[in-house]
Amino acid sequence: MKHLGTQMMATERLTLRRFTPEDAESMFYNWSSDPEVTRYLTWEPQESVESTAAYLEQWESEYENSETYRWAIELNDTEQPIGVIEVISMDERIGSAEVSFRVGKEYWHHGYASEALAEIIRFLMGEAGFGRVWAKADVANVHAGEVMEKCGMLPEGVLKRAGWNHTGIADIGIYAKTVSAAVAEDTSDEDAAMTTHVTKVMDEDGKLRNVISDETMEYVGILAKLELSPAEAEAAKKDMADMLDYIDQLNELDTDGIEPMSHVFPVHNVFREDVVTNGDGSAATLANAPVLKDGGFKVPKTIGE
């Protein structure tokens, strides 16, 4: 494991980033003051923007610790946080991280929670090196369980009367994803039990860039049977990231109404039907044979005598 702290990441519709004090109003009105959001939680809805701001001040100071993993789930369309996803406990002896997430009621059933959770699982297991990412939820909170299963977290069982929240005593469902399960999804080759990872990060100009992980570069070297020096690996990572950035640019092109071509040039009818002919005469063809047998070419055996 290598603790990386709360890194900024991006998905198709979301930016996962650190909270700032300026997020207080969005956090308060989008979810922290809503009793529906906190229904299956243990803490009370916050009563004012000021109380939310106090939480954010504390959270901001905790980001100095590389073992702090807490992201604002920012919706790119509105550029404001709609929820939070975080690691609430960890056990370094076994490489385990417990995650928790919540999204404002207005944004339920749009796939935002699963989109954020899938990216966090990828980061924690693929880059930070956790071998187990797990979470728990009141079994009555059916949608939370669906989100976790959608992200590949498997139900491990139910702890009867093991929790309490605003609904009272609760049965708690446990969900987890482990390294062995992640490897099985990514590769069928037991000898290649290494997963590859590409992260999109936002640069200073506000553009999303691809970043190749060291593990990916090592895996590429193994596949290509190359031993790369640290300098060569860094250069190759940059080249690969630049290629992916260019592909992303191409994917942004509007190709509606443009017919696909089988050639880079506008060549049509590049294939023809087979035409059966009698050849150019067996006598002329066989005249070039070094050895003849039964009216045909005689060739040496390739296996045995």
Image (cartoon, helix red, strand yellow):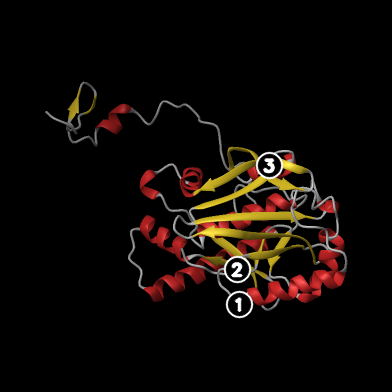
Q: Position of residue 192 (x, y in %)?
A: 39, 49
C-alpha gap between disc 1 and disc 3? 32 Å
Neighbour tally class for label 1: few under 14, some 14-19, many 20 plus, Cα within 10 Å: few
Question: Mark 3: which secondary structure?
Answer: helix
| Numbered circle sitting on residue 241 | none
Q: As displayed, is residue 95 above or below residue 288?
A: below
Residue 193 in view in this figure? yes
Image point 58% across, 74% down: which residue?
Answer: 65
Neighbour tally class for label 3: few under 14, some 14-19, many 20 plus, Cα within 10 Å: many
Image point 73% across, 39% down: which residue?
Answer: 142
Question: Mark 1: which secondary structure?
Answer: loop
Horizontal placement of 175 versus 296: left or right?
right
Amino acid at pointer 2:
Thr
**Disc 2, disc 1: CB below 8 Å?**
yes
Horizontal placement of 48 versus 147: left or right?
right
Q: Which residue is mark 1?
A: 64
Amino acid at pointer 3:
Gly
Neighbour tally class for label 2: few under 14, some 14-19, many 20 plus, Cα within 10 Å: some
Q: Which residue is mark 2?
A: 68
Q: Which residue is mark 3?
A: 145
C-alpha gap between disc 2 and disc 3? 25 Å
Amino acid at pointer 1:
Glu
Q: Position of residue 221 (x, y in %)?
A: 38, 61
